[in-house]
Image (cartoon, grey):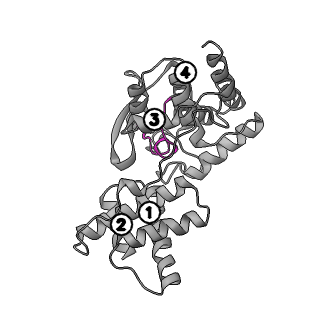
């Protein structure tokens, strides 16, 4: 059944990471009931969902994790309906746990932090371009690795991004991004690798196989320069920084930030926007 569910998710054009997460969460749910109650679940019922939620809470599972598992089961429910295995959707909004997001993040990188990390990469044109794009374009790490050279229009200063669910959007090339991209592309032309691989970011191994850098390599690049700068950083924090900085400086509206970040809802964007506690205190002291 899970193999068919995976095919269904692929047909729905969900992101690879989302598919893997959904498959894992549904498998855990099915295994849980088989081990605890000695029965295999064919159809979903609300009684089973409620029992599962109760057990997750007893195990001190985080509310965000419970909601993620419910999202996976909701998709599984839709899959069962589509395949005429059951007729009703048994998971409702009331089953999800309401969470108030924390506006003050325990940690959020500052413009100074990002500058220090980029400064450490100044002697590597490719890595500097990667860090700059992640910090100032709003794109995801998974989107960055799949940028092709033909997606870039330096004259118009745009990049076509293929996002989640194969949704396509256009992000803008700022002066900072433009300068690092031009330097890196010129380097590839000088090295003779520009016409050998269609992807923007490549390594030595990818020159001939026409594949992009993988996400593991991107993570290693970020970790390398973050450690040199003595700053904590991972790929997702770059998106936190982009959304927060664009909002803090009032450079973009919330709708514009949502579009550039590839969010279908501004509510998702709001979750990315963080302020430092000292900034909040400074504002409160003005009241």
- Is the residue under label 1 in contact with that under label 2 (CB below 8 Å)? yes
Instruction: Find residue 57 and report its horizontal and vertical position in percent.
Output: 56, 63
Instruction: Find residue 237 and report its horizontal and vertical position in percent.
Output: 60, 38
* Crowd rating for badge 2 (residues with CA inside 10 Å; few <14, some 14–19, many 20+): many
Q: Residue at x 53, y 40 (%)?
A: 101
Q: Is residue 119 left or right of residue 188?
A: right
Q: Is residue 55 left or right of residue 224?
A: left
Residue occupied by mark 4? 248
Closer to the camera in the image, 5 or 77: 77
The answer for how far apart the CA atoms under marks 3 and 4 are is 13 Å
Question: For residue 22, which numbered disc appears in the image?
Answer: 1
Question: For residue 76, which numbered disc appears in the image?
Answer: 2
The answer for how far apart the CA atoms under marks 2 and 1 are is 8 Å
Q: What kind of element bears circle 4?
A: helix
Q: What kind of element bears circle 2?
A: helix
- Of the two numbered discs 3 and 4 on the same chain, state the one appearing first in sequence: 4
* Crowd rating for badge 1 (residues with CA inside 10 Å; few <14, some 14–19, many 20+): many
Asked whether 264 falls inside the magenta stretch, the response is no
Write down the region rendered in magenta: 137-149
Q: What kind of element bears circle 1?
A: helix
Q: Is residue 117 above or below residue 145?
A: above
Q: Is residue 76 above or below residue 263?
A: below
Instruction: Find residue 283 and report its horizontal and vertical position in percent.
Output: 62, 17
Closer to the camera in the image, 225 or 100: 100
Residue 221 visible in rendering: yes
- Of the two numbered discs 2 and 3 on the same chain, state the one appearing first in sequence: 2
- Is the residue under label 3 in contact with that under label 2 (CB below 8 Å)? no
- Is the residue under label 4 in contact with that under label 3 (CB below 8 Å)? no
* Crowd rating for badge 4 (residues with CA inside 10 Å; few <14, some 14–19, many 20+): few
- Of the two numbered discs 2 and 4 on the same chain, state the one appearing first in sequence: 2
Question: For residue 269, which numbered disc appears in the image?
Answer: 3
- Which part of the image, by quadrant, shows the C terminus? top right
């Amino acid at each position: 059944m899970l193999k068919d569910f995976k095919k269904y998710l692929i047909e729905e054009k969900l992101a690879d990471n989302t598919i893997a997460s959904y498959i894992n969460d549904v498998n855990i749910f099915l295994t849980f009931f088989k081990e605890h109650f000695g029965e295999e679940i064919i159809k979903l019922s609300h009684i089973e969902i409620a029992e599962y939620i109760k057990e997750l809470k007893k195990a001190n599972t985080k509310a965000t994790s419970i909601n993620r598992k419910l999202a996976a089961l909701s998709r599984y429910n839709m899959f069962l309906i589509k395949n005429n295995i059951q007729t009703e959707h048994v998971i409702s909004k009331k089953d999800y746990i309401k969470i108030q997001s924390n506006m003050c993040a325990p940690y959020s990188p500052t413009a100074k932090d990002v500058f220090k990390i980029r400064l450490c990469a100044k002697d590597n044109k490719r890595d500097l371009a990667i860090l700059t794009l992640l910090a100032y374009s709003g794109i995801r790490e998974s989107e960055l690795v799949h940028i092709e050279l033909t997606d870039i229009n330096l004259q118009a200063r745009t990049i076509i991004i293929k996002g989640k669910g194969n949704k396509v959007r256009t992000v803008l090339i700022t002066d900072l991004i433009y300068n690092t991209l031009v330097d890196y592309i010129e380097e590839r032309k000088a090295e003779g690798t520009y016409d050998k691989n269609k992807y923007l970011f490549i390594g030595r191994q990818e020159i001939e196989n026409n594949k992009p850098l993988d996400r593991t390599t991107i993570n290693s690049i970020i970790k390398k320069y973050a450690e040199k700068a003595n700053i904590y950083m991972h790929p997702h924090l770059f998106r936190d920084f982009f959304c927060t900085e664009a909002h803090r400086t009032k450079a973009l509206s919330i709708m514009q930030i949502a579009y550039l970040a590839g969010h279908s809802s501004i509510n998702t964007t709001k979750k990315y926007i963080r302020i430092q506690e000292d900034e909040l205190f400074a504002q409160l002291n003005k009241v």
